[in-house]
């Protein structure tokens, strides 16, 4: 009877230790995943900021290109006038 009781107490103790290990591992995993989420959110925010800056740079370059084309057309018109006169 005492052996059976001792075995039951040991089994319960082993089960408690296994449970505590699972809880600790789960909590560690959750913390790691939360850190990953935080890091990836920061990376995404940086990537979004870079994208916005690149789009603004593209828009500026396109405007400059159009201004250059307009200036080229104006210069071409003035040169045509000089060569015809």
Image (cartoon, rainbow, N blue to C red):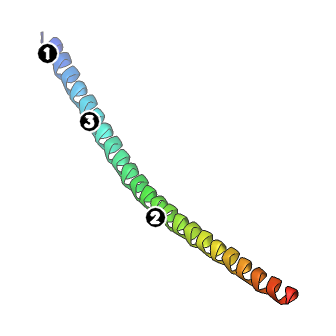
Question: Is residue 54 positioned above or below 38 on the image?
Answer: below
Residue furthest to the right in view is: 83
**Badge 1: how crowded within 10 Å, few (<14), some, or many (20+)?**
few
Residue at 40% over, 59% down: 42
Lateral position of residue 9 relative to residue 31, left or right: left
- Say which mark, if any, is on residue 45: none
Label 2 sits on a secondary structure element that is helix
Number of marks in the rendered image: 3
Mark 2 / mark 1, whichever is N-terminal: 1
Residue at the spot of label 1: 5
Residue 57 location (% of width, % of height)? 56, 70
Label 3 sits on a secondary structure element that is helix
Q: Are marks 1 and 3 in contact (CB under 8 Å)?
A: no
Label 1 sits on a secondary structure element that is helix
- Say which mark, if any, is on residue 49: 2
Residue 47 location (% of width, % of height)? 49, 59
| Quarter assignment of residue 65 | bottom right
Mark 1 / mark 3, whichever is N-terminal: 1
Instruction: Measure the C-alpha gap from mark 1 to mark 3.
Output: 27 Å
| Quarter assignment of residue 28 | top left
Q: Nearer the viewer, residue 63 or 61?
A: 63
Residue at 20% over, 27% down: 13
Q: Nearer the viewer, residue 19 or 37?
A: 37
Instruction: Measure the C-alpha gap from mark 2 to mark 1.
Output: 66 Å
Residue at 17% over, 17% down: 8
Residue at the spot of label 3: 23
Question: Is residue 65 positioned above or below 38 on the image?
Answer: below
Q: Nearer the viewer, mark 2 or mark 3?
A: 2
Mark 2 / mark 3, whichever is N-terminal: 3
Instruction: Measure the C-alpha gap from mark 2 to mark 3.
Output: 39 Å
Q: Nearer the viewer, mark 1 or mark 3?
A: 3
């Amino acid at each position: 009877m005492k052996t059976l009781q001792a075995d039951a107490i040991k089994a319960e103790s082993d089960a408690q230790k296994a449970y505590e290990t699972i809880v600790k591992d789960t909590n560690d995993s959750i913390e790691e995943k939360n850190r990953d989420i935080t890091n990836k959110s920061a990376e995404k925010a940086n990537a979004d900021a870079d994208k916005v800056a690149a789009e603004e740079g593209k828009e500026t370059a396109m405007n400059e290109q159009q201004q250059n084309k307009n200036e080229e057309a104006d210069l071409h018109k003035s040169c045509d006038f000089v060569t015809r006169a």
